[in-house]
Structure formats: C-alpha cells, structure tokens
Amino acid sequence: LGTRGLLIDTGRSFLSKEYILSIIRNMASFKMNYLHWHIIDDQSFPLEFKAYPEIYKKGAGWLGYIHHKTDCDQTADVGKYYSQNDLVEIVDYAKVRGIRVVPEFDMPGHARSWGIGDASLTVDCTKWKQKKIHPVKGIYTVNVCLNLKNKKLYEILSKFFQEMSTIFTDPHWHLGHDEIPAECAAEGKITNTDRLHFLHFVMDQIRNLNRTAIMWDDAFNMVRKTVGNEDVIFQSWHGVT
C-alpha cells in the first residue's frame, strides 16, 4: 500500500473532532499518508448509525469513564460520539492533505458495545464476562463477540456497511477479526460453521461495495482455507518472524 501510517483508537478513548484534525495536520507535516482509525470496540460505539440509533445512543457512553458522557456528566443520556457530519469533515480534511482514512470496524470479536443497544446482537456469555472481570480494570477489558446465529445481526450489518460506504470512501476497510473469545463463543454455541458463514457474508458485503478487506493476522488460517488470501490484506500485530 505504500503507507506511512498512524493508528488512533477511539473505541477505548474518545478523541474530539478538533483533536483528530490536529493529528491530521501534524501527519501532513511529517509526510504521513495513512490514518488507520480503530473506531469501535467493546468499550464504546462512538459512531452515529442512523438506521439503528439505539446502538450508538446506548453504546457510545455505556462505560462512562471511557467516553465520558458530556463533560464527564454520568447522568447524560448519550456518551460522546462522532456524527456522520463529523466523519465526513474528518475524511475530507485528511483527503486534501494527501491522507487516506481507513476505518476499522472490529468484528466479530471486540463487539460488546453493539450489544448495549440491542442485547440480541452479542453473545450472552455470562460465565465468560464474570471470569474476565479484572481486579483493577473491572469490566473494561472484557471482550464479547457478536451473536453470529442471529439473523437480525446480518440485516443490521448490511445497513451499517451501506451507511459507512458513503462516508469512508477509501478502497480499503479494516474488519478486525482478531481475538475472538473462544469461551464466550462456546457459551453462545457459536460454531466454526457460524464463523465461516459470517466471514463469507462480510466478504460479500465488502466486494459489493468495491472495497478490499484488511484483517488482523489472527484470521489468516481461516481466510486462507475459505475465501482465499487474494481478497484480504493481513496486518500483523503478533510480530513478524
């Protein structure tokens, strides 16, 4: 891809629109050309989704201290999130400075915030959640996967991808596919067949939108054996040997 890039993570720590614009200005100063934006994670869904607003309205600030809710006001109804107008402004601001904005919609793991607005979208893995509560960080680090057996999930994702395609126009989208929690999936009776079905669905969606998928290297073996590596760019976070 010929990239000189930077990754930002707003799923775990909210960055204001103005701050992101300042990052882009500084990237341009250093001749960087690729902003990998990890937008969504277990900790928050800070992204306006017009077709299903309950997902971001409930998911953006559900942990409070992550996406503070307005001015750290824990009684506010909605946590901090990016409106679609914000997203368009950021993408356009980057484009005129020669910087691509590649969104990362991490799935099917790291998806707990999806289920805050609609509990049916994620696996109800009670034992896993209890097991993973950290003595200091509490529920912050609990990774929950999407409920791949729920037909409604696929309807929602199709609309989500369609909405995002009008905003994130880069030909590459990052789809995560890392750290799918096996014990959580097992509680929800998610099988390899379900995972393969999900993978094929996502790849069909991406192809129909004329996008190329990027995934973390966790997905390499499953992709290689099913949809074929030629359709996916793999990004390594485990290191290179």
Image (cartoon, helix red, strand yellow):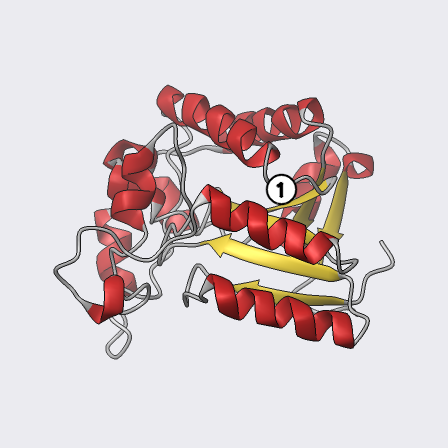
* Quarter of the rendering containing residue 8: bottom right
Image height check: is 240 above or below 109?
A: below
In the picture as drawn, the residue positioned furthest to the right comes out as 2
Front residue of 106/73: it is 73
Residue that appears at 54% across and 31% down: 161
- Residue 153 in picture, x, y percent from top left: 40, 27
Comparing 187 with 160, the one in front is 160
Quadrant where the C terminus is found in the figure: bottom right
Q: Residue at x 50, y 24 (%)?
A: 158
Residue 57 location (% of width, % of height) = 28, 44
Looking at the image, residue 222 sits to the left or right of residue 224; the answer is: left
* Image position, residue 111 (x, y; %): 40, 47
Q: Is residue 119 above or below residue 35?
A: above
Q: Label 1: few (<14), some or many (≥20) within 10 Å?
A: many
Q: Which residue is painted at 17% across and 66% down in the image?
A: 73
Q: Which residue is mark 1?
A: 168
* Image coords of residue 127 (percent x, y): 23, 52
**As shown in the figure, which amino acid type bears the numbered disc 1?**
Phe
31 relative to 121 in the view: left or right: right
Is 62 drawn above or below residue 137 in the view shown?
above
The residue nearer to you, when weighing 238 against 213, is 213
Q: In the shown orientation, is residue 194 left or right of residue 208?
A: left
Location of residue 212 by image quarter = top right
